[in-house]
Every structure is written in C-alpha cells, then in structure tokens.
Amino acid sequence: MEILVERGCGLDVHQATVVACVLRVLANRQIQKEIRSFGTTTRELGELRLWLQAQGVTHVAMESTGVYWIPGHEVLEGQGLEVLLVDTRALARVPGRTKTDRRDCQWIQRLHSCGLLPGAFRPREEICMLRTLVRDRGNLVAEQGDGVRRMQKSLEQMNVRVHRAVAELTGATGMALVRAIVQGERDPRELAKLRDPRCHQSEAEIAEQLTGHWREDHLFSLGQSLKMYEAIQERMQDYDRAILARREGMEREEYRGEGPPELKNKGKAKTILRRGQAPLRQALYRVSGADLTAMDGIGVETVQAVTSE
C-alpha cells in the first residue's frame, strides 16, 4: 500500500518498557526500519524523544494502554511531535497481528504509515488540565452523595425523620439539625428551633418528626458520616477554586471583565444558580462567549462538564 507518513514511528507502550519502530523512506524509495526499546522513567522517555528527533520522526502512533501511555504522550507532544493516540479496538479488528512487543510496534507503525489508524479524541493541553480537575470533582460529588445516604440511613434507623421535617437533608435546616444531634442535642423542641425562617413547616411540625430512640451505634455512624460529608465539602471548595482559576486563564480577550446578559424575553425562565455558582457562570461566559445556561434544562454544572470534555 502507498506510504503516506514517510517519517513515522509506532510505539508499543507497557508499564516498564516502550518499544519503538521507526520507518524511513530513503531517496531510492527503499524502506528502512529500526526498532529500539526504552524504559518508562522520565529520563528514559526523554531519551526516546531525543532518539526520535535524531531520526527525523514527525508523526508518532501509540496504543492507548491503560494509563501507561499518558507520560510518553505528554513528553512527546510537548516537543512538537504529532502524536496519534490509537484505540486498542482499532488494532484488534485488523487480522494478521502477532502478539509480541517488537511485532506490535511494527504493526502499529505499518498501519499508521498507510493512514489506516483513526486517532482518538485528545483535546489541547489546557483543556486536558481542566478536564482532570472537573472529573476529580465529579468523583467527589459521588462520594458526597454516599455520605448523605449514610447519614439518612442512620437517622432512619433511629426513627429521626429529618427528611420529613425538611425538604432536603443537606439544606440549611437539615444540616443544622444533624450537627446538633451529633453534638448531643436530643430534645426535639430545641432541635426544632434550628429551623430556617424560610422553612415551610412550623417548629411544632418539625419537633413531631424528631423524636428518636438515639441508639449509640447509630449516633456514632451518623457522626462519622457527617465528618466524611464535611471533609468532602472542603475538598470540593478547593477544586472549585482551582477550576475557576484555570477558567479565568482561558478567558477570551473580547469578553474579559464582562458578565452574561440577563434574559429579557418574556416567558423564559431565569437561570437558577446554586450557592457559589455565579462566579463560575461568569467565567464560562467569558470563555465561550455565550451564556449556555440560558438554554432550558442546562445548568452551570452541565456546561462545566461539556466544555471541559
């Protein structure tokens, strides 16, 4: 088949080794190959980069093996090489492949040189850095939900029905009640006094739901779940600050210092923001040049996830 990439390399990446196959098309159209193995420490990946540059390589194809490809990809891409990340399924579908490290790198290089390997989507570096933070924060949201469910379970087992007294356990009144219970308050009338003025139910109605049997093991579990929830809250705030700082570094010059315009069309619902989301909404507007939260059903967190991916 016709060779489209005349200075290409195929990399077979493993945890401890990287095997590279370089193809060169000589002046007389003869094909020359050279195969070398490297380690995966930062120094050894630097040696791989220098060797590829010395060979005049311009394009590199590598298989996306677990997370082992990430250091090599970042080292090579940072030096101006065009790196093609290949889904392992694209290679597995091609028949005739013999599984050894040396043959794998040759097979990758051969398919790449003929233009037969589709590359996986890989955004630019600043988006990758933002994506890491957003994904990690998403994991914390899942862990936080687990902590809330544990608190709910402990309260249910003691027949303390906070979820019936307030609309949301993690709201202002709900968390005030949980903290007071953990700190030792047992009188339902005193607990009911912690209600937020905006709460729909009266103190008497709330007190009726807060009479429990206060078993020690459930109280201990409630306290531990509360600690986990609050610790995750602090970590999420750290991530929010880091994400906002990175967003601010990506602002478009023409929108710097501006905020999203408020909706003026009649019949359009106003964008609903949770506490602390206003700065992020402004940053998202300055990056994209449009207030994507103005679309029905699209919130700040959805825009955050989509634009980071």
Image: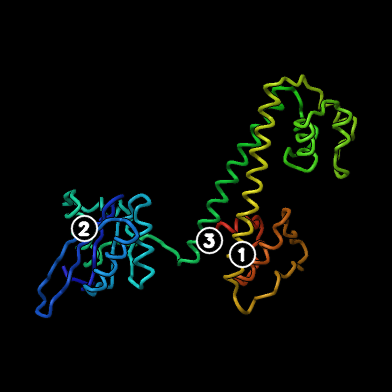
Q: Quadrant of residue 289?
A: bottom right
> Under tag 2, what secondary structure?
strand
Horizontal and vertical percent for residue 242? Answer: 60, 59
Mark 1, residue position: 245
Nearest to viewer (mark 3 / mark 1): 1
Q: Residue at x 77, y 19 (%)?
A: 213
Q: Which mark is residue 130?
A: 3
* Residue type of the residue flagged with mark 3: Leu
Foreground mark, 2 or 3, reads: 2
Amino acid type assigned to the residue bearing label 1 in the image:
Ala
User: Would you identify the image quadrant in which residue 223 lies?
Assistant: top right
Pointer 2: residues within 10 angstroms few (<14), some, or many (20+)? some
Disc 3 from disc 1: Cα separation: 10 Å
C-beta proximity under 8 Å, tags 2 and 3: no
Horizontal relation, residue 77 to residue 197: left or right: left
Examine the rendered structure and indicate whether residue 224 appears above or below residue 126.
Answer: above
User: Which residue was labeled with disc 2?
Assistant: 37
